[in-house]
Amino acid sequence: MGNSLLELLSPAVKRLRASEIRELLKLVRKSKEIISFAGGIPDPKYFPKEELAEIATKVITEQGEYSLQYSETKGVPELREALADFLYRNRGFKADPENIIITSGSQQALDIVARAFICIGDKVITESPSYLAAIGAFKLAGAELVGIKIDENGMKTFILEDVLRKLKSEGFKPKFIYTIPVAQNPGGVTMSRDRKKHLLELASQYDLLVIEDDPYSYFVFDEKADITSLKALDKEDRVLYMSTISKILAPGIRLGWIVPPEELTRRLELLKQYVDLHSPTLNQYIFAEAIKTGLVDRHVKKLKNVYKVKRDAMVSAMEEYFPEYTWYSRPIGGFFVFTYIYKQGFDAKSYLTVAIEKYKVAYVPGQGFHPDGTGENSMRLSFSYPSPETIREGIKRLSQLIKEL
């Protein structure tokens, strides 16, 4: 052919760049010497393999004519009913099973949201920093992102209020506000109850949709922490709630879910129909059985203790080794600590190769998590995968990098 086939690609696809995290994971896997704080990966030692094997056998044997067949786009009724009960017990809101859409992981949920609401040039509000894959999905759809800074109490809603007022005066209405209120990725911070209420008040005042992403609230280590979901506080049905099985059971099962405002459910269901027809039927039956038998609840309870020990190991090591010119979050849950290094000229991305090759430690540079491209001096550290001993050694190496460069 005369012209390269690449020229046939759409402008949006031509602009795609590889995920820093995915590329980093490929590099780190090649060396056992490297201590990796890069991916937010569940510790595979704790996957409930035997229980899942028993459930899978039971599902195929007893319900094979259904579990191995096509299913409806919203998801199999057994899972949606089990999930409604699970959400009420764990997140405090009642979801009608008919208003739950099962997705192929939370990434598909983000993709559906982006496809459904964003037109090229639309304003979308996120936290800054925010989840890298959400930023990518929204930008791919053509959104212009407006980042709102966070602190230890989550999104600074007083800044959000100023931004919304300014956008309105300029004739702009954001399509939605995207937030991870509990154990935020990458920030590790949790939104206070007052800010949650303020956010919902602003959403009401400016008539906005709120997207609540909630993968980590099941792993909260501080019993006194307020982890109330926005959906539970939502009195106007303007919060679209999403979450995933990836952290609470196993990411390989690739299931997530959306609980949208009721008037949006049918349209989002039709959109998913054209994306992948439906999520894997067998996996849905396995997940439903895992909820009904109590496996998910037992597994989450076990993992909370595991990840608390790892969180404590990371924060304790940072308190001991990190210099005074750093700031880092002290997460009440989740998988991540986020840190800023306030040292002139420190660029986490440019130093990553040195970190891996000389210090044998890996992290995710924080700039990509910031919608405006700032945050060169930041990094995300995940404590979910390494052992507590390995975490301590890795933080010691990282502190040497920060001090010496």
Image (cartoon, rainbow, N blue to C red):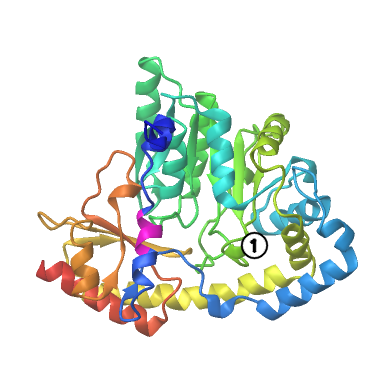
Instruction: Determine the residue positioned at 18% across, 57% down.
Output: 350
- In the image, is residue 400 part of the stretch drawn in magenta? no
Is 197 or 37 nearer to us in this picture?
Answer: 37
Give the total of numbered labels: 1
Is 7 or 118 nearer to us in this picture?
Answer: 7
Image location (x, y in percent) of residue 361: 27, 73
Q: Locate residue 253: give its quadrant.
A: bottom right
Image location (x, y in percent) of residue 267: 69, 30
Image location (x, y in percent) of residue 318: 28, 72
Could you tell whether 188 is left or right of 231 in the image?
left
Is 128 or 108 nearer to us in this picture?
Answer: 108
**Residue 401 visible from this viewpoint:** yes
* Label 1 secondary element: helix
Instruction: Determine the residue positioned at 71% across, 33% down.
Output: 270
Quadrant (top left/top right/bottom left/bottom right) for the N terminus: top left
Could you tell whether 314 is left or right of 300 in the image?
left
Q: Is residue 370 above or below residue 105?
A: above
The residue at which mark 1 appears reads as 253
Q: Which region is colored magenta?
A: 20-24
Q: Locate residue 355: give its quadrant.
A: bottom left
**Residue 143 visible from this viewpoint:** no
Instruction: Determine the residue positioned at 40% across, 26% down.
Output: 164
Quadrant (top left/top right/bottom left/bottom right) for the C terminus: bottom left
For disc 1, the neighbor class at 10 Å (few under 14, some 14 to 19, many from 20) is: some
* Magenta span dominant secondary structure: helix
Instruction: Determine the residue positioned at 58% across, 49% down.
Output: 229
Image location (x, y in percent) of residue 402: 17, 67
What's the amino acid at mark 1? Ile
